[in-house]
Amino acid sequence: MGHTNRPAAWVGLLAAVLAGAASATGPAPGADTIGSKSAAGSSTVGRFPAETPRQRSARLAMVAGIERHGVSESTTLAAMRAVPRHLFVREQDVPYAYGDQPLAIASGQTISQPFIVAYMTALVEPDSGDRVLEIGTGSGYQAAVLAEIGCAVYTIEIDSLLAATARARLARLGYRDVHVRHGDGYLGWPAQAPFDAIVVTAAPPFVPRALVEQLARDGRMVVPVGEIDGIQSLTLVTRDEAGTVRLQPGLPVRFVPMVSGKRQDTPSLLHR
């Protein structure tokens, strides 16, 4: 599985990204188990609070748009159709939950553009049963998408308020196979390594060595690499069976910087 990087789709991909600039989260802190997961593509009826026909229709239209812009991996698209994004945004933003744009959440951060969530998910080719590390929990939406595929998700968030809120939300929605930790994403989660895939949703100036070391053989990591105030490159990092690491620069994106250390409940003007 995975995204097909066809030249014809590149312009659409770039337009989709620049139209709703990608957001990101920082590293993150401590450890706790959260919510549950449903297998890839499985029905979520009865597991989530009731939704309106309009919300379901809007979600399906959102995913159709993501597919038109070049994300064709069926498992990723099924997970995006299953996760109710309106449950991961602020109440006042529920009417806008299925637009292909980032939206504000707590601590001055944002929930990422749906296209970017789908694109990054497809790029690491997650499979049911995989162990996935996410750096930057944010609202918990990306973790929920990975859990819908059937992955065991270990997610790190540097902001204590966001970590606690995401932990409670994911637990409430039944994502038992998502584990949230408040800590420093640059350090990864050594006790749970190796990981089949790593998704980084904040931009470091270089690929963190600890994350590379925690990537399993035949593993894949996606990370936006670049300067704080510039355009970053959404880089695919692969590690083959022999342990050789390769970096493949990709889509131009704009994420918030990945910071080191733990951050307590302090509002930030940076958006992810």
Image (tube, rainbow, N blue to C red):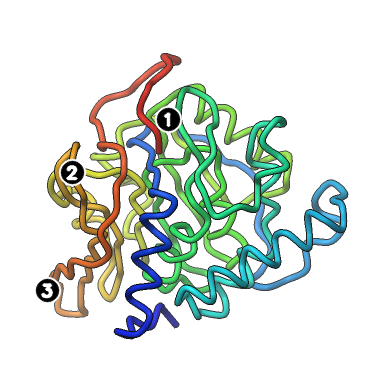
- Residue 238's place in the image compared with 139, above or below, is below
Q: Residue at x 38, y 58 (%)?
A: 17
Q: Residue at x 33, y 76 (%)?
A: 10
Residue 95, position in %: x, y?
72, 42
In this view, the residue in front, 158 or 74, is 74
Residue to which mark 3 is pinned? 244
Q: Specify the label residue 51 is tagged with.
A: none
Residue 212, position in %: x, y?
20, 57
In this view, the mark in front (2 or 3): 2
Q: Is residue 237 left or right of residue 157?
A: left
* Contact flag, marks 1 and 2 (Cβ < 8 Å): no
Question: Helix, strand or loop at disc 1?
Answer: strand
For the residue marked with disc 2, what is the amino acid?
Answer: Gly
Graded by Cα atoms within 10 Å as few (under 14), some (14 to 19) or many (20 or more), the crowding at tag 3 reads few
Q: Residue at x 45, y 83 (%)?
A: 1
Residue 49, position in %: x, y?
84, 46
* Contact flag, marks 1 and 3 (Cβ < 8 Å): no
Residue to which mark 2 is pinned? 230
